[in-house]
Amino acid sequence: MLAEDLVLLREGITRILEAEGHEVVAAVADADSLIEAVAEHRPDVTIADVRLPPGFSDEGLRAAIRLRGQHPGEPVLILSQYVEAGYAAELLSDGAGGVGYLLKDRIGELDDFLDALQRVAAGGTAMDPEVVAQLLNRGRRSGPLTALTAREHEVLGLMAQGLSNQAIADRLVLALVSVEKHIGSILAKLELPHGQAVHRRVLAVLAYLDRAADRPVTPVPRAPGAAGRAGRAR
């Protein structure tokens, strides 16, 4: 499912996805049509621009948040030209997984975009590093984040981007066991639950940072069958 008001961009993304074997069940140009199309098709994943008619301000983001309220865990990948940390945090705050927020001018490789789309469809995260940085800065001012070391902040930021433990190890040039120890320490300091899938831990961390709560965040289970809908990135 695609929501983009620019015809050339909308058609271009549609053709790219179809060329990669995905089915685009609907491609719309405004927020109201987005809401209706998702209700009708229940796609595996929705791609939405931030600025949609009629106001061209934040209609796409607000529609995405509305969709997540109506259909908990509905995978949504936001494309934007700027960071709106408040809305990004609200998208993440339900802890249900399947959320992405990418900046258009930083998508340098088609494979990276397609990988992010698949990760979101599967219930993971795909957050632009700038979005992660702003969320971390919001939460770093007070609370449990002050207990994290500089290296743990680095690891937390990469977790939030949706990277696997091995990818984090490669990025920071660390042994995998060291990354696992850092993540265990982060979860302990933030009082987050153990034994959860990586993407759920990431979402719990981001939700925790935004709310600056004094209690741990427990991820919300996805709706029955949601994981099974990730077979096709629509």
Image (cartoon, helix red, strand yellow):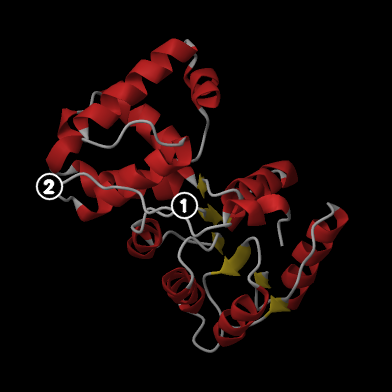
Q: Looking at the image, which residue is at 79% across and 71% down?
A: 11
Q: Looking at the image, which residue is at 21% across and 44% down?
A: 216
Where in the figure is residue 161, as x and y percent of width and height?
48, 41
Eyeballing the image, is 60 above or below 211?
below
Quarter of the C terminus within the rendering: bottom right
Eyeballing the image, is 106 above or below 224?
above
Where in the figure is residue 55, as x and y percent of width and height?
49, 86
In the displayed image of the protein, which residue is found farthest to the front? Answer: 224
Element type at mark 2: loop
* N-term-proximal mark, 1 vs 2: 1
Image-based side of 226 in relation to 136, left or right:
right
In the displayed image of the protein, which residue is found farthest to the right? Answer: 19
Three-letter code, disc 1: Gly
Element type at mark 1: loop
Quarter of the N terminus within the rendering: bottom right
Q: Looking at the image, which residue is at 83% across and 51% down?
A: 20
Q: Report which residue position mark 2 lands on.
A: 214
Which mark identifies residue 163? none
**Distance from Cα at disc 1 to Cα at disc 2:** 22 Å
| Disc 1: CA contacts within 10 A as few (<14), some (14-19) or many (>=20) | many
Eyeballing the image, is 168 above or below 134?
above
Determine if residue 149 is in view: yes
Image-based side of 115 in relation to 96, left or right:
right
Q: Report which residue position mark 1 lands on.
A: 97
Where in the figure is residue 12, as x and y percent of width and height?
79, 65
Three-letter code, disc 2: Asp
Where in the figure is residue 145, as x and y percent of width and height?
20, 36
Q: Quadrant of residue 26?
A: bottom right
Image-based side of 124 in relation to 16, left or right:
left
